Every structure is written in C-alpha cells, then in structure tokens.
Amino acid sequence: NAGVTQTPKFQVLKTGQSMTLQCAQDMNHNSMYWYRQDPGMGLRLIYYSASEGTTDKGEVPNGYNVSRLNKREFSLRLESAAPSQTSVYFCASRATFTGNQPQHFGDGTRLSIL
Amino acid sequence: KNEVEQSPQNLTAQEGEFITINCSYSVGISALHWLQQHPGGGIVSLFMLSSGKKKHGRLIATINIQEKHSSLHITASHPRDSAVYICAVRSNSGGSNYKLTFGKGTLLTVNP
C-alpha cells in the first residue's frame, strides 16, 4: 500500500518556466491537499479538494492552479515559476473532508526556482 | 500571534533522556495532531487526539482542552528519534474547520 505518492521528488526550474507536480493516493480518500513548507514557517495550505470534482483556495493560492483529475489524483501547476515559489511541497489526503481523521502526507517535492 | 505555538524550537538531548515538547494554541479545536518529519523526509502522523492521553511505544501525547495545551513525550530517547516534531490543530469553528493550522515545529536532536 503506497499511500500518497508525489512526483517528482526534486526539481530545478528557471524563472518563468512552468511545471506540474503530481500527487496520487491509493486509500480511496475523498479530500486532498497541497501545502508548501518554508524555513521558519509552519506548513501553509495552497489549495484543497474536498471531494472529487471540487477545488478551493487555501491560504497561499497565488501563482498556483490545481486539478482534481479523478478521486486518486490531485495535481499542482506552476504556470510561471518565480524564485518565491522555491519550497518543499507536500500533498496530503484524508478520508473525509469534515470528519476527524489523520491526514496522510506524501514524501514531498523539493522545488528550486533559479 | 500564531494560532499554534511550539516550544522549544530546538532541543538537544542525550540518548536515554526523557523528552517533552509543548504545543499551545489559541482557538477552539476539534482535534490536535502530532506529526514527525525526519531530515529531508516526508511527514508522518504520530497522534490525533481531542482529549486525554494516547500512547504508542515510547511516545505519549497528552492534551488539556481547558488550558489549550498539548505535550508530546518521548521516553528513553534514541538517536533515531531525531526529527522535527510538528503540532497541528483543526479548528472547531464552522468557517475554518476544514483545515489544519500548523506550528513551526521543534527540531529534536538526540546524541548517542
């Protein structure tokens, strides 16, 4: 059981390039989340998907777009990367949106924008 | 003021010592989570609790809802416990109960 799988694990981009971070979960979870983790700060929510077919902005959505492709997959896209988007990105999933269950995290994508 | 405050920020211990990491929060919550992140690694959920105490192996998590405070204890610490420990809370207010608010983490280093 793989849990939450993120690809790629590492990526270096030049300013202005675009890329998509992929996330898939095999736990049949309804809700999925994208976070960024920066030094000296707690994890911050970028976007979330409460259920298949819905997406909503979190705390720091500017510069990002998401797609909930199906129940398993939730991708994060940087259309025009900026150095301020250098960060570690984590995808997470949870069984339901409103219930009290733990979130399951992927291993992260370490992204550098030059 | 952050909604979730952890202390200490950094903690260095000798193998075998008893470790305590604290988390204070300012909002009403429905649940509190303790997470572990090894250097360069992913994030693993250790505990989710809304009252009382939970124990898993050498790890113990407690919460005092009235005082808005939780502690994570590690007994007989070991170098493999070296990691960042993160506290996160889920608010119980209708507009915010969909998301977790995270503390900045406590970096624990256990020396042999």
Image: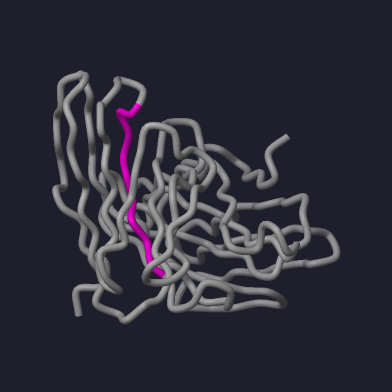
Point out residue A39 in the picture as x, y percentages from the top left corner.
Answer: 42, 31
Point out residue A42 in the picture as x, y percentages from the top left corner.
Answer: 51, 41
Q: Quadrant of the N terminus of chain A?
A: bottom left
Q: Quadrant of residue B5?
A: top right
Instruction: Write the residue at 52% across / 72% down.
Output: A97
Region rendered in magenta: A85-93
Residue A91 inside the magenta-drawn segment: yes
Instruction: Write the residue at 77% across / 54% down.
Output: B27
Q: Quadrant of the C terminus of chain A?
A: top left
- Residue A100 relative to residue B29: left or right: left
Colouring mode (rainbow / by chain / secondary structure / one colour): one colour
Q: Is residue A9 above or below residue A40?
A: below
- Residue B98 relative to residue A112: left or right: right
- Residue that protrudes farthest toward the right in the picture: B66
Instruction: Write the residue at 47% across / 67% down.
Output: A50
Q: How many marks overall? A: 0
Point out residue B74 in the picture as x, y percentages from the top left corner.
Answer: 51, 63
Residue A1 inside the magenta-drawn segment: no
Point out residue A108 in the picture as x, y percentages from the top left corner.
Answer: 27, 50
Instruction: Write the residue at 65% across / 60% down.
Output: B71
Q: Is residue A70 above or below residue B67?
A: below
Q: Quadrant of residue A89?
A: top left
Closer to the camera in the image, A82 or B12? A82
Q: Quadrant of residue B67?
A: bottom right
Prevailing SS of the magenta stretch: strand
- The answer to whether residue A90 is seen in the rendering is yes
- The answer to whether residue B112 is seen in the rendering is no
Q: Is residue B65 above or below residue A81?
A: below
